[in-house]
Amino acid sequence: MNIKPLSELRAFLEGYASPMGIEIVDVEFSEKDRSLTIFIETPAGVDLDTCEAFHNAIMDPIDEFDPTYDAPYTLNVSSPGLDRPFKTARDYERNLGKEVEVKLYAPLKGKKLLEGILDSFDETTVTIVSGGEQLRLPLNRIAKIHKAIKFD
């Protein structure tokens, strides 16, 4: 199926998200089930009402934008989830000073899974503080980094 570039769709959606206090986190299209999923975030988090309100706000305009060139698709609006991987600089900024889990492609000091506080980041590295030690991790060694999930 032929679809418009997701970056173009994302830019289009920003015009609807921003006035609602919503951030577009990611946009994905699944060929398998012909679904377009918009992942959103707000400073207060995302609940079902937020997803529904944004879905209703974009439903007609996105049909006019026609992301699939008249092919049928299912539109979904969703929270990115607690364990979603960081993909953008905004993801890292939002989690500075917070506990994160880092999964590495190859072991570092015998470990492929690290936990620590996200201290800093740039275009090529992430720095976490783990066990009182500051670890600079090249992004190309990181398989996945996400917010640590703690259950009380």
Image (cartoon, rainbow, N blue to C red):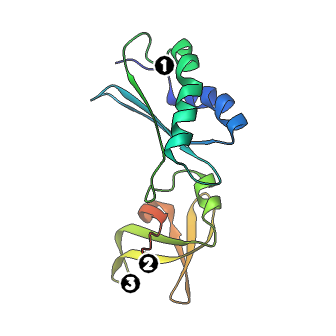
Q: Is residue 85 above or below residue 21?
A: below
Query: Which numbered disc, 3 or 2, marks the residue that appears first in the sequence?
Result: 3
Q: Residues within 10 Å of mark 3 (few under 14, many from 20)?
A: few
Residue 25 visible: no
Q: Residue at x 55, y 17 (%)?
A: 60
Residue located farthest toward the front when viewing the structure as drawn: 49
User: Comparing marks 1 and 3, which lies closer to the viewer?
Assistant: 1
User: Can I make out residue 29 in this image?
Assistant: yes
Q: Amino acid at mark 1?
A: Pro
Depth check, mark 3 against mark 2: the one in front is: 2
Q: Nearer the viewer, residue 143 or 78?
A: 78
Identify the secondary structure beneath mark 2. loop
* Residue 51, position as x, y percentages in the image: 52, 39
Q: Residues within 10 Å of mark 1 (few under 14, many from 20)?
A: many
In the image, what residue type sits under mark 2?
Asp
Mark 2 and mark 1 lie on one chain; the one further toward the N terminus is: 1
Q: Which numbered marker is on residue 109?
A: 3
Residue 144's x, y, as percent?
A: 42, 60
**Percent x, y for residue 142?**
43, 63
Which residue sits at x=66%, y=29%?
A: 16
Residue on which the image places disc 2: 152
Q: Is residue 90 above or below residue 68?
A: below
Distance, label 1 to label 3, CA atoms, is 47 Å
Q: Secondary structure at mark 1?
A: loop
> How far apart are the alpha carbons under marks 3 and 2?
29 Å
- C-alpha distance separating marks 2 and 1: 43 Å
* Residue annotated with mark 1: 67
Q: Nearer the viewer, residue 4 or 148?
A: 148
Q: Quadrant of the C terminus?
A: bottom left
Eye-nearest disc, 2 or 1: 2
